Amino acid sequence: MTQIIVLPHVELCPEGAVIEAEAGKSICENLLSNGVELEHACEMSCACTTCHVIVREGFNSLEPAEEIEEDLLDKAWGLEPNSRLGCQAIVGETPLVVEIPRYSINRAKEGKK
């Protein structure tokens, strides 16, 4: 098991969290299965940016983002050079520290088309 440290997030994880993550699964899958309710409006199909995370440590251990993920990330709120979509970033053997941005763009939740 690989450790993921989730930095505190006001709504989703006020105290932060340390979880034992399963390698081979995405950051999003691991957070959800450990009680961190990361938004994922497209059901993890790489069609939105609601699962945007910033990988503060361990970023270089992740496989590079594919073009579709890069294109979507351009639309994410608070984009940083070490941003990834949680549904696409697959956990390996290296521990990660992730930050969930304060805001996300969720058009379904906001009632917009």
Image (cartoon, rainbow, N blue to C red):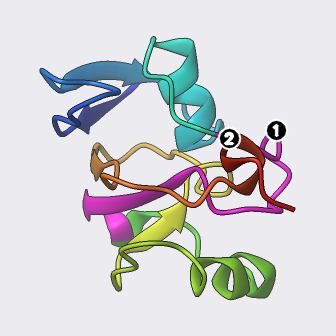
Tell me residue 77's x, y (percent): 45, 72
Count neighbours of disc 2 (C-alpha within 10 A) and say few if under 14, some if 14 to 19, many if 20 or more. Answer: many
Q: Assess whether residue 49 is covered by the magenta stretch.
A: yes
* Residue stretch rendered in magenta on the structure: 40-59
Tell me residue 15's x, y (percent): 12, 21
Find the distance from the CA under tag 2 to the CA under tag 1. Answer: 5 Å
Q: Which mark is residue 104?
A: none
Quadrant in which residue 93 is drawn: top left
Residue shown at the point (50%, 46%) measured from the top left: 92
Tell me residue 20's x, y (percent): 37, 19
Q: Assess whether residue 107 is covered by the magenta stretch.
A: no
Count neighbours of disc 1 (C-alpha within 10 A) and say few if under 14, some if 14 to 19, many if 20 or more. Answer: few
Direction front: furthest residue: 111
Residue occupied by mark 2 = 40
Residue occupied by mark 1 = 43
SS assignment at label 1: loop
